[in-house]
C-alpha cells in the first residue's frame, strides 16, 4: 500500500489557516480576543484524505468542502461548546459535511479536530450494505451525529493511533495501512450511528441562539 503525502503547518494567522486545506473554500473569522495559534496536519492517500486542525481561539468557519466528498470529523479535544449549522456541538458530536452543504461552524474556545474526507458515493454504497440509507441521509441533512461518550472514546483512540503513525511514532503500523483501516472504522461508525442513538434525534436538541 502506498504511503501518504504528509504536510504540517503551524500558523499564527486565522486567514492563512482558512486556506490551508486543499480543495476547501473557506473563510475564518476569529471571535475571541488574543493572539492566534493554530496548526494543520494534512495527509492524502489514493482515495482518501485525513487532517487534524487545531486552534486556540473561537472561530466562525464558513465555506464548503470539495464537491462529491463526505467529511467526517470528530473532536480530539474541545474546550466548551460550539455550534454547527445552528446546532450544539461538543466533544461527543461527529460532524458530517457533504460537498453540496454549506459549512457554518462556530468552534469551541479551543479545538483539536480530526477529519476524514472520502467519496460520498462510497459511503452511500456502504450504507446500502447495512440497509440504512435513510438514516444516513437524515444525518447528512442535519450535519451532525451525537454519539455516546464510550463510542466517541473508541473512535478518538483510533484517530490518535493514525496521528501517531503519521508522526512516525509507530512506523511499524505503516502509514497507509493505519489510514485505510481507520477509514473503515470511522465510516462504519457513521453509517451505523443510528444503532447507538436509538430513536433520539441524531443532533443535539439545543439550538444556537439567533444572536450568536
Image (tube, rainbow, N blue to C red):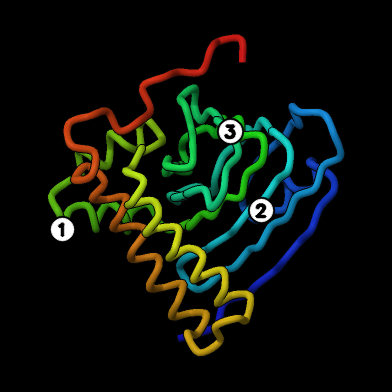
Q: Is residue 125 visible?
A: yes
Q: Are marks 1 and 3 in contact (CB under 8 Å)?
A: no
> Which dot, 1 or 3, sits closer to the camera?
3
Q: Label 3's element?
A: loop
* Quadrant in which residue 39 is drawn: bottom right
Q: Earlier in the sequence, mark 1 or mark 3?
A: 3
Q: Is residue 37 above or below residue 85?
A: below
* Whole-number angstrom distance, CA of label 1 to CA of label 3: 37 Å
Q: Are marks 3 and 2 in contact (CB under 8 Å)?
A: no
Horizontal side, residue 149 vs residue 15: left or right: left
Residue 179 locus on image (x, y percent): 46, 72
Horizontal side, residue 23 vs residue 16: left or right: left
The residue carrying mark 2 is 21
The residue carrying mark 3 is 80
Front residue of this view, candidates 163 and 85: 163
Q: Label 2's element?
A: loop
The residue carrying mark 1 is 129
Label 1: how many Cα within 10 Å (few below 14, some 14–19, many 20+)? few
Amino acid at each position: 500500500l502506498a504511503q501518504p503525502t504528509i504536510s504540517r503547518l503551524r500558523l499564527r494567522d486565522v486567514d492563512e489557516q482558512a486556506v490551508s486545506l486543499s480543495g476547501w473554500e473557506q473563510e475564518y473569522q476569529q471571535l475571541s480576543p488574543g493572539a492566534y495559534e493554530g496548526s494543520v496536519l494534512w495527509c492524502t492517500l489514493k482515495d482518501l484524505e485525513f487532517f487534524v486542525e487545531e486552534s486556540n481561539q473561537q472561530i466562525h468557519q464558513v465555506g464548503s468542502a470539495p464537491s462529491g466528498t463526505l467529511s467526517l470529523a470528530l473532536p480530539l479535544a474541545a474546550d466548551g461548546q460550539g455550534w454547527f449549522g445552528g446546532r450544539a456541538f461538543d466533544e461527543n458530536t461527529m460532524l458530517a459535511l457533504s460537498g453540496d452543504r454549506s459549512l457554518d461552524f462556530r468552534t469551541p474556545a479551543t479545538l483539536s479536530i480530526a477529519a476524514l474526507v472520502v467519496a460520498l458515493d462510497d459511503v452511500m454504497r456502504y450504507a446500502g450494505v447495512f440497509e440504512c440509507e435513510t438514516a444516513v441521509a437524515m444525518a447528512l441533512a442535519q450535519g451532525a451525529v451525537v454519539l455516546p461518550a464510550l463510542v466517541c472514546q473508541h473512535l478518538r483512540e483510533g484517530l490518535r493511533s493514525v496521528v501517531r503513525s503519521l508522526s512516525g511514532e509507530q512506523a511499524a503500523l505503516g502509514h497507509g495501512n493505519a489510514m485505510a483501516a481507520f477509514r473503515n472504522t470511522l465510516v462504519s461508525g457513521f453509517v451505523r450511528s443510528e444503532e447507538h442513538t436509538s430513536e433520539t434525534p441524531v443532533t443535539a436538541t439545543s439550538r444556537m441562539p439567533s444572536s450568536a
